[in-house]
Amino acid sequence: MANIFSNLKYLRKKKGLTQQQFAEVMDIKRSLVGAYEEDRAEPKYDLLKKFAAFYELSMDELINEKIDDKWKPKPKTDSTNIRILSISVDNQDRENIELVPIKASAGYLNGYSDPEFISDLPKFHLPMFRQGTYRAFEIKGDSMLPLQSGTVVIGEYLTNWNELKTGETYVIISKNDGIVYKRAGNKFKENKSLKLISDNPVYEAYAIPGDDIVEIWKAKAYISTEFPTPPAHEPTLETLTSMVSHMQKTISNLDRNKS
């Protein structure tokens, strides 16, 4: 089993999976993935068989052959709505937050599953987002006011679409609509339409087919150069009392002037 440890790490990264994502797909603990990749533990036969099937390899290939760049993974979607995502990492093996600017939106539809395209996107890190997989999308238009056009929305990758919640905001990537930032109008169901709602009431809600969607990112934060306009403050009881007192003094002064 000389090559199994390096093969597991190589294949996982080639698929664009984090250790946590691979652990979820395999239904094992993340710590076990790390132990297998670092040669601190050996997976049992049944698990090895599961690994080989996932990577579309024979047991002999996975255990004995050195898997390198000659092996080309195929896109994979399973029946539990778990999608395989391409990611990029820095020189410390930390996941980047890739930025998809407006000018790259069209290309993202063709390159979202291409590791080379993802690696060419601008990247950054935020200290509050250490766990999970995140991507940033620059939004266009005024359909989600008060967020202005040009705002960057940071989303967390939604592995299982059945976890989508009505009323919350998401970045939805679909074949026909491209990249949109909307509020979910209903739960996701296979072969059903997903209703998308704008926060700007000028725009009507609309639905897109579930099988048209390729990625969903749950909105977690945003970056904008436009500061929100403070709302008009309603007068407090103290303010009203002060106003009435001032009016009474003004009236008294007017009465004195008349006399």
Image: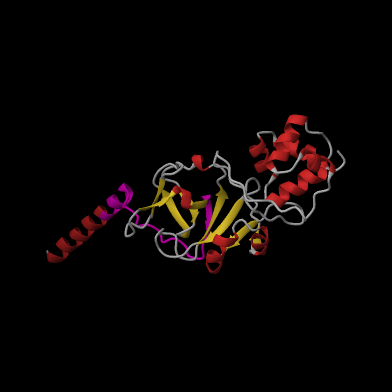
Q: Judge whether residue 49 is colored magenta.
A: no
Q: Quadrant of the N terminus?
A: top right
71 with respect to 112 (left or right) = right
Furthest toward the right, the residue is 2
Q: Position of residue 153 (x, y in %)?
A: 52, 57
Furthest toward the left, the residue is 259
Q: What segment carries the magenta color? A: 215-243
Identified at 68% across, 56% down, the residue is 88
Snapshot quadrant of residue 91: bottom right
The number of numbered discs placed on residues in the rendered structure image is 0
Q: Where is residue 103 in the image (x, y as percent from the top left)?
A: 54, 69
Q: In which quarter of the image is the C terminus?
A: bottom left
Q: Position of residue 18 (x, y in %)?
A: 68, 46
Do we see residue 47 in this rendering? Answer: yes
Q: Judge whether residue 228 is colored magenta.
A: yes
Identified at 77% across, 30% down, the residue is 45
Do we see residue 38 in this rendering? Answer: no
219 with respect to 183 (left or right) = right
Identified at 40% across, 63% down, the residue is 142
Q: How is the image coloured?
A: secondary structure
231 with respect to 159 (left or right) = left
Snapshot quadrant of residue 100: bottom right
Q: Position of residue 226 (x, y in %)?
A: 48, 65
244 with respect to 167 (left or right) = left
Snapshot quadrant of residue 4: top right
Identified at 46% across, 42% down, the residue is 190
Q: Nearer the viewer, residue 100 or 27?
A: 27
Q: Nearer the viewer, residue 230 or 62?
A: 62
